[in-house]
């Protein structure tokens, strides 16, 4: 993760996570390690996967003590195997113990997302379809989770509500129809903004095309309906498929030739990658 992004955006969330875990003191650590001792601990992968979030992992420790050092054997995006030693963390043992859980929570979560995303990306090889995430992220974790999607080979949909125009069913209902919603967005938004419209049936597809939508999201349609919609759109707008897209069913969708497929499962359903800090040892300092 970019160091500037880390300090400007990510640090506040990491500090909140640390405060959640250490709101007063780490009683267990202070009991067994009341004074400074230097030590090291190994970061070990306990399953095969794609690693993501090493900078976030390290930042947890350096926020607690800037002198903490991490020596890596891998980098974000690398495929890792069970039992591999990914890194060695060295520093104040109190910091290693107190930061362990928060650091691992980030690394396990982000590596799990990268791993799951990569599995789906591999299923898309040889097609024109690009995999995107959604805003179905864990509160306070979006900057990290969307980063992990990119590490896994996927792409980001809009980051937040300020990032792009997506007229969903309730926007359309509020405006009084697809055409009115698109016209209102076109009149309000800067000319550089593309307008995406979520549609649920062929009548809405026709209306979106006629209104000049730039991107048409085919939401929760059957493969047959999507095939008919793509013919109807006929290249006049980019196409996106969404709605309960998972690793198990994505190939039925990509065979249709949509431009994009967005999946909330990348961030809300990816299992963690099992990673541990093990073999802590005291380093004698003369």
Image: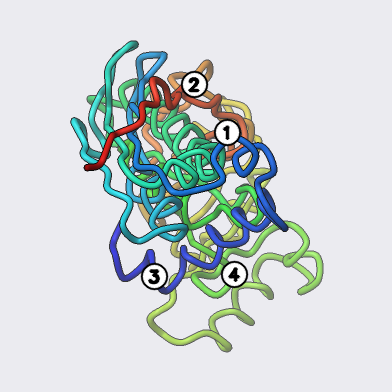
Rendering quarter of residue 180:
bottom right
Badge 1 marks a residue whose secondary structure is helix
> Is 23 situated left or right of 279 in this image?
right
Q: Do the residues labelled 2 and 4 touch (CB within 8 Å)?
A: no
Image quarter in which the N terminus is found? bottom left
The residue positioned farthest toward the front in the image shown:
286
User: Alpha-carbon neighbours of circle 1 within 10 Å: few (<14), some, or many (≥20)?
Assistant: many
Compared across the picture, whether 163 is left or right of 257 comes to right
Front label number (3 vs 4) = 3
What is the distance, in whole Å, between disc 2 and disc 4 at their CAs? 27 Å
The reply to whether residue 129 is in sight is no
Residue at (33% x, 26% y) in the render: 42
| Label 1, label 3: how far apart the Cα atoms are | 28 Å
Q: Earlier in the sequence, mark 3 or mark 4?
A: 3
User: Could you say which disc has been placed on residue 7 in the image?
Assistant: 3
Q: Which label is found at residue 247?
A: 2
Spatial distance from mark 3 to mark 2, Cα to Cα? 34 Å
Q: Earlier in the sequence, mark 3 or mark 2?
A: 3
Q: Where is residue 248 in the image (x, y as percent from the top left)?
A: 52, 16
Determine the secondary structure under disc 4: loop
Q: Which residue is drawn at 50% across and 48% down?
A: 35
Category of crowding for the residue at label 2, using alpha-carbon neighbours closer than 10 angstroms: few (below 14), some (14–19), many (at least 20): some
Q: Where does label 1 land, which residue?
A: 265
Q: Residue at x 42, y 74 (%)?
A: 8
Classify 62 as above or below 5.
Answer: above
- Where is mark 4, residue-wise? 161
Left/right of residue 215 with respect to residue 225 in the rendered view? left
**Residue 283 percent coordinates (x, y):** 29, 34
* Badge 1 or badge 4: first in the primary sequence: 4
Q: How crowded is mark 4: few (under 14 residues within 10 Å), some or many (20 or more)?
A: few
């Amino acid at each position: 993760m970019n160091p500037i992004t880390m300090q400007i955006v990510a640090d506040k969330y990491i500090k909140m996570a640390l405060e959640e875990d250490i709101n007063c003191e780490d009683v267990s650590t202070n009991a067994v390690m009341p004074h400074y001792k230097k030590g090291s601990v190994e970061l070990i992968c306990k399953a095969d996967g794609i690693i993501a979030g090493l900078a976030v992992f390290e930042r947890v420790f350096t926020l607690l003590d800037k002198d903490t050092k991490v020596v890596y054997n891998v980098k974000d995006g690398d495929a890792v195997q069970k039992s591999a030693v990914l890194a060695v963390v060295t520093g104040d043992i109190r910091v290693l113990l107190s930061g362990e859980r928060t650091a691992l929570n980030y690394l396990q979560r982000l590596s799990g997302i990268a791993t799951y995303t990569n599995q789906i990306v591999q299923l898309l090889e040889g097609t024109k379809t690009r995999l995107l995430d959604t805003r179905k992220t864990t509160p306070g974790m979006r900057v990290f989770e969307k980063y992990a999607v990119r590490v896994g080979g996927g792409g980001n949909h809009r980051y937040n509500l300020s990032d792009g125009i997506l007229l969903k069913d309730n926007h359309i209902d509020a405006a009084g129809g697809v055409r009115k919603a698109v016209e209102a967005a076109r009149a309000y938004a800067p000319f550089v903004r593309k307008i995406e419209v979520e549609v649920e049936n062929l009548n809405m597809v026709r209306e979106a095309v006629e209104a000049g939508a730039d991107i048409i999201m085919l939401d929760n349609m059957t493969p047959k309906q999507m095939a008919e919609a793509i013919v109807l759109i006929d290249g006049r707008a980019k196409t996106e498929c969404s709605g309960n897209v998972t690793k198990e069913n994505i190939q039925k969708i990509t065979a249709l030739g949509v431009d994009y497929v967005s999946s909330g499962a990348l961030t809300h359903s990816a299992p963690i990658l099992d990673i541990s800090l093990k073999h802590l040892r005291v380093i004698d300092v003369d």
